[in-house]
Image: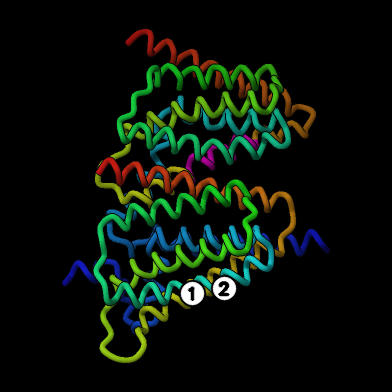
Amino acid sequence: MPLLFAHLMETGFGGFYDGIAHLLITPADVLLVLGLALLAGQQGAAGGRLLLALLPVSWWLGGSVGQLWGLDQTLSLITTLMVTVVGVLVALAQKLRSAVFASLVTSFGLLFGVVNGFTMPAVRQGVSLDMLGVVTAVAVLSVLISGQVVVMRSPAVKIAVRVMGSWIAAAGLLSLGLWLKG
Amino acid sequence: MAQRRLFKHGFVLLALVALVMAPAAQAHVAEGGAGSVMAGLLHPVTGLDHVVAMVAVGLWGAVLGMPAVWLLPVAFPMVMAFGGLAGMVGLPLPGVETGIALSALVLGVMVMLQQRLPLMVAAGLVGLFALFHGYAHGLELPDGADALLFSLAFVVATGLLHLVGIALGELARFPWGRWVQRACGGLIAVVGVWSLMQLGGS
């Protein structure tokens, strides 16, 4: 049982705040949200709207599934790969078709939600406040970061965003190496 | 007015990124996590040849001007990480230490002579050196580190070294700036020669 809660942050303020803290102290989750928000900002306002509409919902759905199902060890490999892919797309400032971007956001949100859901305490009835905290943090970070990227049109900012993407991709690749090395 | 708005938005974005990134480094994370961040930040600055080569990348980018000044720092971390991945999984790459020493020498000479090679050639050269640096780092990465935290801190430290080089390169706006650039390039090349001599002696 302790393994189940190993990643859950206990703030002492209740499940909702535990969920928020959980997201902020999980590097892979933070990097994915940051990367997707930067990528959404690069797509323009429509990208930001898609991200806000799809990421929290898919994360929630994934979380609900994750609370029911177990977690396979190979998921950490997949999540690291996803972070790397998002970083590469940001570094390349890749313009994606809406359908492709929506699929990307949904699939990544679902998978990260599954991983999150497994680490959350099981809920016997009603809504999981922990999961609600996580999803709220995902939504707020998504909209704030993507919104800032959309409104800033300076070339220097665009470069800074691409540099951040390259750092995310590089961190993902190195992490992948450490994972493979065991 | 536009500048003030840009500054405001830039500040907000920076604050958001800091907010997002900072908690991972705090003491709330398990001790290993905070240790991994420190280890990752310090790892790239523990070898003089690595440090001068990273600074040289930014410096040469500034000498080359747009778009190299941002393209090299964007491309370098990814290629370096790919080299690191190759090192960690045990793919063979000959002459790694020689390549690292040569990177300082060649990049230092390029900066000293203010060489402006075609972008593709410059990117290819820097990419090749990035592979060597990444491979060496990959071999040396400690076991048991929190992989993503360590890697992120490591990459950020490398990026900051590039930034130091770019800042030095921006001194060219001043009348004496070119001489500072050339002097830095000369120093970097000297470190490269010293590293090669160390290799020859060992």
Residue range highlighted in magenta = B156-167
Residue depicted at x 50% and y 25%: B129
Say what secondary structure mark 2 lies in: helix
Res A99 quadrant in image: bottom right
Where A93 falls versus B55 (above or below)? Answer: below
Does the stretch in magenta take in B161? yes
Callouts 2 and 1 close, C-beta under 8 Å: yes
Residue B200 placement (x, y as % from top left) = 38, 8
Q: Nearer the viewer, residue B162 or A58?
A: A58
Q: Which mark is residue A56?
A: 1
Q: Is residue B141 left or right of residue B2?
A: left
The answer to whether residue A13 is seen in the rendering is: no
Where B96 falls versus A167 (above or below)? Answer: above
- The way the protein has been coloured in the rendering is rainbow
* Amino acid type, mark 2: Leu
Q: Residue furthest top?
A: B201
The answer to whether residue B174 is seen in the rendering is: yes
Residue B201 placement (x, y as % from top left) = 35, 8
* Amino acid type, mark 1: Pro
In the rendered image, which residue does mark 2 sit on? A52
Q: Is residue A12 left or right of residue B121?
A: left
Residue depicted at x 65% and y 60%: A43
> Could you tell me which quadrant the C terminus of chain B lies in?
top left
Q: Nearer the viewer, residue A24 or A166?
A: A166
Q: Chain of mark 1?
A: A
Does the stretch in magenta take in A130? no
Residue depicted at x 64% and y 28%: B60
Res B5 quadrant in image: bottom right
Say what secondary structure mark 1 lies in: helix
Give the class, few, some or many, for how many residues have Cα within 10 Å of label 1's Cα (few <14, many ≥20): many
Residue A131 placement (x, y as % from top left) = 38, 78
